Amino acid sequence: MGESQPGLVYVCNADEVEPDSVIAVAVGDFPLLAVYNLGGEYFVTDDLCTHGQASLADGFVEGDEIECPLHAGRFCIRTGEPTLDPCTEPLKTYPVVRQGDGVFIRVAP
């Protein structure tokens, strides 16, 4: 599935992400992305922890935070802000748009 309209990039189908979980998704030229389902609300961040070379998709979702599997630092999934040391640098987040069964991110046209 491709772009449905200019400025939107398809990431995955919503049903690919179980509630209160995260998956890693490769999308075009983007870095590996982490897609989160928090009770039916979807969020997308870069998948790589900003503290260490770890995939956040291998981490643990706790409420609205993702815990890195490498050093147990945490980030707010909604904002990308670090919430627990040793993480200090925020994650890049992407605006999410749901269309039908798809999860898309909005990018500059």
Image (cartoon, grey):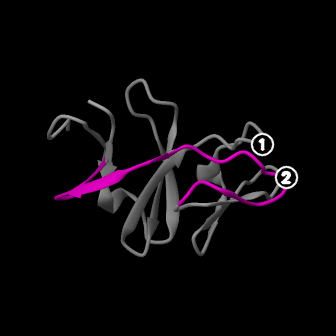
Which residue occupies the foreground of this view, 17 or 66? 66
Q: Where does residue 103 sit, x and y in percent of width and height? A: 30, 52
Q: Which residue is labeled 2 in the image?
A: 86
Q: Residue at x 32, y 33 (%)?
A: 108
Q: In which quarter of the image is residue 64?
A: bottom right
Query: Which numbered marker is on residue 87?
Result: none
Q: In this view, does 14 lie above or below 109?
A: below
Name the element at disc 1.
loop
Q: Which residue is labeled 1 in the image?
A: 51
Q: Which residue is drawn at 52% across and 62% down?
A: 78
Q: Where does residue 40 sit, x and y in percent of width and height? A: 36, 72
Disc 1 residue type (three-letter): His
Mark 2–mark 1 CB contact (< 8 Å): yes
Left/right placement of residue 32 relative to residue 28 reads right
Residue 95 in magenta? yes
Outermost residue toward the front in this view: 108
Which residue occupies the foreground of this view, 64 or 28? 64
Left/right placement of residue 67 relative to residue 72 reads left
Q: In which quarter of the image is the N terminus?
A: top left
Q: Quadrant of residue 8?
A: top left
